[in-house]
Structure formats: C-alpha cells, structure tokens
Amino acid sequence: MNLTHTHRHLHSEQGALRGEHPGRSRNPVIKVADIAWLEFEKPDLTRAEAFARAFGFHTARHDPGELHLRGTRAGGPCVILRRGPRTRFTGVAFRARDEGDLLRLADQSGASPRPLPESIGGLSVDLIDPSGMPVRVVAGTHELPELPGQQPHLFNFGDETRRTNAGQRPPRVPARVQRLGHLVIQSTKYLEALDWYLDNLGLIVSDFLFFPGQRHRGPTMSFIRCDRGSTPTDHHTLAMALGPANRYVHSAYEVSDLDALAAGGEYLNERGYLRSWGIGRHIQGSQIFDYWRDPDGFLVEHFADGDLFDDTLEPGWAPFTASGLAQWGPPATKDFLGTDLKSARRELVSMISALRSRNEFDVNRLVGLLKVPTS
C-alpha cells in the first residue's frame, strides 16, 4: 500500500490510503462558523461558579437558576449552566454563518427555528445527533463586549532580545479564559455521528486516529474543524472517538500563553482542585495543554498555541495510542485515560451494555480500545 504524499512536510507524516474516509462531505447542508457554547445542568451553581472563576472564566449572567460563563473575547458565553437535580452535560451549540444558513438547515432537517431567550437573543435550530446528543445551531445572538485580557510576555530568544532591564514575573492568578476552543465526545455510533456532522454542519477532518492494528477497519477518532475556506481555523472544534458510551469527554478553553496556563494551574492547585494531566504539548493540534477536574468531575482544559488550518489540508492518519497523545510532558494519567479504579468500574458497565446493543462497538473494537492505554 502506497501512502499519498499530501502530508509530506505538513502536519502529519501519513495521509489516507486509497478508499479511506475522505474526511469531508461533498455537499454539506451548511458550513458552521464556529462552536458557540456548551450547556450543563448542575445542582450547586455556587460551587460551580467558584471553580469557574478560579479556572479563569468571567460571570456574564448569574440568576438563581442559570449561570453564564464567558471569556475575554467579544462574543457570546462559553458555557451555560442551569440548576438541575443532577450533574450532566446537556448539549453543544454551533454558530451559523448567518440567518440564511440557519433557515436552510431548518428546511433540510425539518426542525423549526425558534427564538432563544432574550438574555442570549437570536434564533436556534435544535437537532439531535446520532449519538443522542442535543446540538443547537444558532444565529443572530447578542455579542458581549471584549474584556481586558492577559498580555503575552516578552521573551528573549538567544540573540533576539525583546526584554532588557526588566524581570519576568508572571503573577499567580487565574488564567484568563479567552474563548471556548473545542469539545471532545465519545460515541457508540462514531462513523454515523461523524458523517452527520460533516453532512449537516460542513465540518472537515484534520486528523484521523485508528485503533492499534485495526486501520483496515477504519478510523476510531477524528479531530474536526470548521470549514471557513481560506481563513485558517482551529485544528479541531469538535473531536469524537468510538467508545462504549455516548458521553462528554472534555472541553478546552484558550488562554494567552504558557505562563498564563502554568501560573493559572498553580492558582488552581493551591485551592485544592485536581489536575488530571499536564502540562504538555499535544501532537494532533500541537496545543500546550493542562487538564483539570471541576468539582463535579467534568474534565476541562486550558490550552495555548494551537494549530490553525485552512480548507486545503487533507486529513492525517495515525494510530490511537496513549504515548501518541503528547510530544512532551508527563505520561497520560490513569485519571485522564479513564483507567483508574473509579473510572474502570464505570467503563466495565458501559462496555457490557455496549456489547449487548446494536452499535459500532463490537468485541474487536473493544480489543483495540484496550490496547490504547498501553500503546
């Protein structure tokens, strides 16, 4: 089998083989512009807000039953939390390019546009992806004004001198979140869900991963970006992986630079919050990362210096391995990989349930998944 040369000297050493998934739809219904926000329910909004502020969010709205968290960039909220009887992830919103695209999506999907609450403004078309996750596509929402952000530091690089007669003293304060970068989910219907996002929202794949020894069976994870033509966009706005349950994995929020990320991590650590994995630099997407658990167990990421791609790059292909998740940094932790005792019990139940159901997660895929943490 001869590899294509599309990716030589580019973002991936390997491109697709003949007949593999192309990573984009020939004729998508629309092409969304970006991810808009995530929605959760939590019983204790006070505790959730305390962590959010330590993580680096600003509070845009705080009602008894609803909390809007934002970054410093102009735009809408990054996260909407609603008071509920239990903690759960309730969906994602993407931003359409304009209202015309939103109406086109509504016509094709059969879903009626509906007005969003006045606190957000605009219209929404509410869909359900093949995994059962609520997906909103919105347009015309209110824009919050830009807030002061953290200015990147001046660095000296060998003979390139930018800072003289001054020390470098990053304050140990919360990293100021700039924006929501991406969402990662797990699906028992990975390929069906992948095609749904490509066909309906016009997303395109930046990188595919496959289980060790199972490339012939197709990909099992994809890093997917928005298609803005010649305008570069984040390496991934959405990532999804095949697994034994349909669930939220993590979400990522951009900060200004490594110093903001590291000092913000020290601030979180001093307040007793749990670092899941970091600091390191990823391979797919290249971003510097630091993962944390919020008080309800949700995984959230600070990131900086991520890759930006336009629509000309084709998908890269690589094996899905724990060692292949980072260029440098500590090894991926059991907490991050979900192989710690608490997570393993939950995963065992999910695996048994998935194997008894009609989906893409079969025994061979289970064998492939079990190889990932040790590969």
Image (spheres, rainbow, N blue to C red):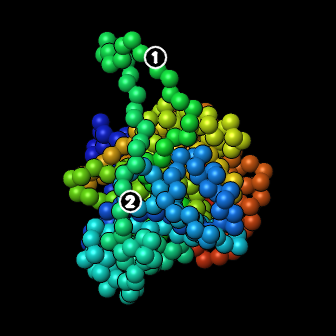
Front-lying residue, 365 or 92: 92
Residue at 56% across, 55% down: 250
Front-lying residue, 346 or 50: 50
Q: Which residue is mark 2?
A: 144
Q: Residue 214, can we see it?
A: no
How far across and down, in percent of the image, does residue 232 sit?
28, 49
Please report whichever mark, 2 or 1, sits nearer to the chain's N-terminal start. Answer: 2
Is residue 87 positioned above or below 309 on the image?
below
Residue at 55% across, 75% down: 132
Horizontal relation, residue 100 to residue 62: left or right: left
Front-lying residue, 287 or 261: 261
Is residue 235 positioned above or below 158 on the image?
below
For mark 2, give the secondary structure: loop
Mark 2–mark 1 Cα distance, whole angstroms, equals 35 Å
How far across and down, in percent of the image, does residue 237 sit?
41, 56
Horizontal relation, residue 158 to residue 222: left or right: left
Q: Which mark is residue 167?
A: 1
